[in-house]
Amino acid sequence: MGKIIAMANQKGGVGKTTTSINLAAGLAYLKKKVLLVDLDPQSNTTQGIGARNNIKKSTYDLLLKNADVKDCILHLDIPPMDLIGATIDLAGSDLEMANYQNGREQLLKKQLDKIKADYDFIIIDTPPNLSLCQSAALVASDYVVIPTKATGGSIDGVGELIDT
């Protein structure tokens, strides 16, 4: 059974995306089966991995259009891993998820549980704010890595994330 790891900090610019991409790529090159999930509407992970123009179904489709999780997966050769990419459509997801009366925090977990056994690691890059997407990532995860810089704002973000 795979392990799900979220990269989370409510502060931007602390290295969540860089850590997500490099950890996922490193594990993939070590012959681990890896899925990288981009939950940030800015889609920097998707762009950084070189897949922005190849996304047919995104994390938005996965969360809010009930797309089959396997239809959202893009298989990459370099690095040798899979990706569920993000698009700008994800920007309005918090407003849409707010309409759900129950279970909105479970949306991602339910989808990833369907494929968790297919991977050694699922790495989730989260948005730099306290949002329903970030909450969904935390609920879905077995572990959370909190990238940080030695600055006041970044350290404050750690405390806020722990409170969350």
Image: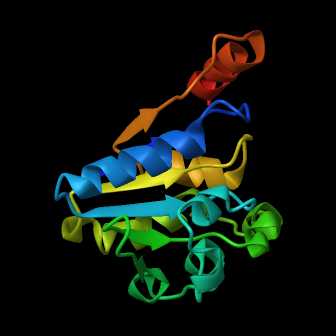
Residue shown at 72%/66% (left/top)? 97
Q: Is residue 22 above or below residue 112?
A: above
Location of the C terminus (image quadrant): top right
Residue shown at 36%/54% (left/top)? 25
Q: Position of residue 87 (x, y in %)?
A: 71, 73
Q: Is residue 151 above or below residue 60?
A: above
Question: Where on the picture, by quarter, is residue 86?
Answer: bottom right
Q: Is residue 113 above or below residue 53?
A: above
**Residue placed most toward the observer, 16 or 103:** 16
Location of the N terminus (image quadrant): bottom left
Colour scheme: rainbow
Q: Position of residue 102 (x, y in %)?
A: 62, 64
Residue shown at 45%/88% (left/top)? 68
Q: Residue 29: in sight, yes or no?
A: yes
Q: Position of residue 58 (x, y in %)?
A: 60, 78
**Residue placed most toward the observer, 105 or 4:** 4
Q: Please state if 66 lies on the left or on the right of 95 as rendered.
A: left
**Residue placed most toward the observer, 52 or 96:** 52
Q: Please state if 151 lies on the left or on the right of 56 as rendered.
A: right
Q: Residue 99: in sight, yes or no?
A: no
Residue shown at 56%/74% (left/top)? 51
Q: Please state if 132 lies on the left or on the right of 16 as rendered.
A: right
Q: Position of residue 132 (x, y in %)?
A: 68, 53
